[in-house]
Amino acid sequence: MAKEFEGKVVTLEEETVEEEEIIEEEEKVEDPRRWYVRLYERNEPIAKDVFAGALYYSEIEDVIGIDTLTPQFSSDIEGFMESDIVIDQADGNKIFVSRRENPKEWIQRLHESVIGKDFYALEAEAVYETYETQ
């Protein structure tokens, strides 16, 4: 932009506004976990409770699987693994958790449900899954 001032031409430079760089924040991706639940056959008070097996839910694969099974309990555990769970609440209401629609919640709340008459689950424990990127 040029202006005439007392016979002299003076050029004023327009300020250029640099475009601000837009820095996209990387989404925070939590390390994927694998949730394990140990199952026991209830025998107390006559005998000790017996380890029946362990199930897991993988956040990477989005599946529920069998980690360990004791042979004498395998058919019982495989049977209830295919069904939804029911959780009785203190106010008398029941919560149904679908294994197909909410597998992560199913494994995390298994310890709150009734698993047949002879079995119970401990609370789910998470470990970080290891994976390699290539």
Image (tube, helix red, strand yellow):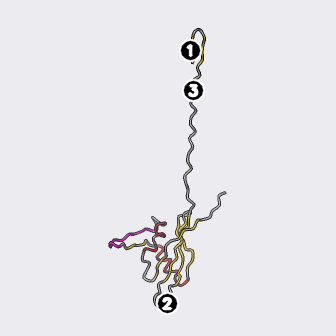
Callout 3: SS: loop
Residue with the mark numbered 2: 47
Quarter of the figure with the N terminus: top right
- Sequence-earlier tag: 1 or 2: 1
**Image point 49% across, 90% down: which residue?**
47
Whether residue 70 appears in magenta in the rendering, the answer is no
Q: Residue at x 56, y 65 (%)?
A: 33
Residue bearing the label numbered 1:
3
Look at discs 1 and 2 and give the one toward the viewer.
1
Q: Label 1 vs label 2: CA separation? A: 101 Å
Q: Where is residue 121 in the image (x, y as percent from the top left)?
A: 48, 77
Number of marks drawn: 3
Decide: is 103 above or below 16.
below
Q: Percent from the top left, x then y, of residue 115?
A: 44, 78
Q: Going from the N terminus, do you reach mark 2 or mark 3 first?
A: 3
Q: Which of 22 and 34 is in front in this view?
A: 22
Choose top left, top right, bottom left or bottom right for residue 68.
Answer: bottom right
Quarter that holds the C terminus: bottom right
Q: Can you identify the residue that label 3 sits on?
A: 15
Badge 2: few (under 14), some or many (20 or more) residues near its Cα, within 10 Å? few
Which region shows up in magenta?
Answer: 90-98
Q: Residue at x 48, y 69 (%)?
A: 108
**Badge 1: how crowded within 10 Å, few (<14), some, or many (20+)?**
few
Up-down relation of residue 118 to residue 25 (above or below):
below
- Residue 45, relative to residue 57: is it above or below? below
| Secondary element at tag 2 | loop
* Marks 2,3: beta carbons within 8 A: no
Do the residues under discs 3 and 1 have CB atoms within 8 angstroms?
A: no
Q: Choose between 57 and 27: the one closer to the eye.
A: 27
